[in-house]
């Protein structure tokens, strides 16, 4: 059965002719009927058949309309210092950009024609004008949003358009839009930025004059956690440039650092993202420099200390990284990381014994505290266990640092450290795997009453005496991990 709809070619030609006729007869941009005509063309461009029939002359007409509208908006504002009676112009600008945006979808030919006509330049100029007007007029905001959507679409899959946008818009336009109060504006700006970024341009962001763009993206991802584009820029570009990570981290507040580290932790833990060895070592050094900041949390008045919170997040990130095979070997070889971790655990454990605080072993059965240091000792023990996994040199280091008795002393249930006993079991097993000296030490401690036999049973281990020598063997029971 034949379709009752008119084919897009003749209809588009008729609308284009009407648009050209209006342009010749009317000097004002918002001429009667022009908005409806552009809207009908935008609707035709939603379909591939309509987009493929677009002509260069049609895009030329749309370019002239945008230029006229831009001029009239600018003159009206300069003469009257107001945007009164400009609604029709903003509506027309929005419809023009919808038309252009739709025409770009999966159509390289249209993208190239528009770029060669100068539509990217005209759009950037208009966006800068709209930003300068500083108003929350809804019709203006809509025009602003549509203009950014057009830039995103003309750049998609088109390196020449990406290069032109980057040359014209970076960094000022991106920075202005990323700092806008309108959430949609920020999202569309992130879409354009993501589409234009590549490794070389990402490296440009670390330069002093450009760093604010990267920081603005990071803040947008925190302010608008549902913003997919901001998140993709951070994970697909920013985190892959070690020097940029260092430069951003140096400029962030402690609160922002904590959020940044949470994002990294999530990416590694949930998405198995592997960050560079250079970035991993940088985070290790951050932890080593600030590891003892957490000890201030032994005093109740300091439970919101932001530097301590950053250190806690660093430990969380290192735990995730050492649980990922892509990072483990690099971190196991990091100088002093294991020593610093054991030392920090020793100091926290000692602080908990000297007075009653968040590091004190507690078993009241009450609801878990929301204190930021809850679980800190558990995570340190987990980190030690990961660093010793199938690594004889690190197993021996823990022995030399008197870390084994320390870990055994943290095997009891502790409300302030959920799963601490399970992590201690895991760590002891990693410390004793194919390590006779560590096995013998634990066996001697058990004989002398220094190690709780029930702890060894929970680990699936038992001590036997053989030829005057104590041996740690499997009990044949499944360990309670």
Image: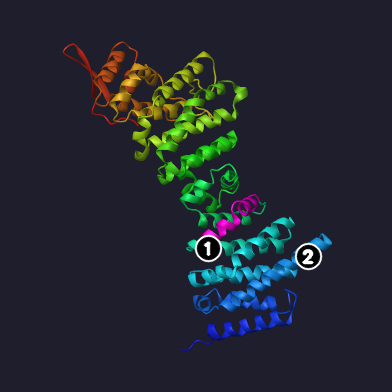
Instruction: Give the crowd class for mark 1: few <14, some 14-19, many >=20 residues within 10 Å.
Output: many
Which scheme is used to colour this image of the protein? rainbow
Is residue 146 in sight in this rendering?
Answer: no
Does the magenta stretch mainly form a helix, a strand or a loop? helix
481 left or right of 463? right
Circle 2 sits on which residue?
75
Q: Is residue 408 in the magenta section?
A: no
| Residue 466 locus on image (x, y percent) | 17, 15
175 left or right of 334? right
340 w.r.t. 236: above or below: above
The image quadrant of residue 322 is top left
Residue that appears at 49% across and 15% down: 353
Instruction: Give the crowd class for mark 2: few <14, some 14-19, many >=20 residues within 10 Å.
Output: few
Asked whether 259 or 431 is in front, the reply is: 259
| Residue 159 locus on image (x, y percent) | 48, 61
| Alpha carbons under labels 1 and 2: distance apart | 30 Å
Residue that appears at 47% across and 44% down: 239
Q: Which mark is residue 161?
A: 1
Q: Secondary structure at mark 2?
A: helix
Label 1–label 2 contact, CB within 8 A? no
Range of magenta residues:
162-179
310 left or right of 337? right
Query: In the orientation shown, which residue stands out farthest toward the left?
Result: 467
């Amino acid at each position: 059965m034949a379709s009752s709809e008119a084919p897009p070619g003749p209809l588009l030609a008729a609308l284009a002719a009407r648009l050209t006729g209006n342009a010749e007869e009317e000097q004002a941009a918002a001429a009667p009927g022009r908005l409806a005509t552009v809207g009908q063309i935008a609707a035709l461009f939603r379909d591939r058949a309509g987009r493929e029939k677009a002509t260069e002359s049609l895009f030329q007409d749309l370019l002239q309309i945008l230029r006229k509208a831009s001029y009239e908006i600018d003159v009206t504002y300069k003469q009257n210092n107001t945007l009164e009676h400009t609604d029709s112009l903003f509506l027309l600008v929005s419809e023009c950009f919808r038309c252009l945006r739709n025409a770009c979808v999966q159509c390289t030919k249209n993208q190239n024609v528009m770029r060669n006509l100068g539509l990217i330049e005209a759009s950037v100029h208009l966006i800068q004008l709209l930003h300068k007007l500083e108003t929350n007029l809804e019709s203006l905001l809509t025009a602003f949003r549509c203009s950014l959507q057009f830039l995103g679409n003309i750049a998609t899959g088109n390196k020449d358009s990406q290069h032109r946008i980057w040359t014209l818009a970076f960094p000022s336009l991106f920075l202005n839009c990323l700092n806008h109060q309108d959430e949609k504006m920020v999202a569309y700006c992130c879409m354009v930025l993501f589409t234009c970024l590549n490794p070389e341009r990402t490296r440009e962001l670390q330069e002093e004059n450009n760093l604010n763009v990267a920081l603005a993206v990071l803040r947008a991802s925190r302010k608008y956690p549902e913003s997919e584009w901001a998140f993709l820029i951070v994970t697909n570009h920013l985190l892959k440039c070690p020097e940029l990570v260092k430069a951003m981290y140096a400029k962030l507040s402690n609160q922002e650092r904590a959020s940044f580290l949470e994002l990294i932790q999530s990416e590694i833990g949930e998405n198995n993202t592997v960050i560079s060895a250079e970035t991993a070592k940088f985070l290790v050094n951050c932890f080593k420099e600030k590891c003892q900041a957490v000890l201030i949390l032994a005093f109740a008045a300091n439970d919101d200390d932001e530097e301590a919170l950053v250190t806690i997040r660093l430990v969380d990130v290192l735990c995730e990284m050492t649980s990922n095979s892509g990072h483990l070997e690099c971190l196991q070889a990091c100088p002093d990381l294991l020593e610093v971790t054991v030392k920090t655990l020793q100091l926290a454990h000692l602080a908990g014994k000297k007075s009653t605080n968040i590091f004190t072993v507690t078993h009241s059965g009450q609801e878990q505290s929301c204190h930021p240091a809850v679980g800190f000792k558990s995570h340190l023990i987990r980190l030690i266990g990961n660093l010793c996994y199938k690594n004889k040199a690190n197993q021996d280091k823990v022995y030399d640092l008197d870390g084994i008795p320390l870990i055994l002393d943290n095997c009891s249930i502790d409300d302030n450290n959920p799963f601490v006993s399970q992590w201690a079991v895991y760590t002891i097993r990693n410390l004793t795997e194919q390590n006779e000296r560590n096995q013998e030490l634990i066996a001697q401690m058990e004989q002398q009453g220094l190690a709780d036999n029930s702890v060894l049973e929970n680990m699936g281990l038992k001590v036997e005496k053989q030829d005057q020598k104590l041996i740690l063997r499997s009990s044949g029971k499944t360990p309670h991990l």
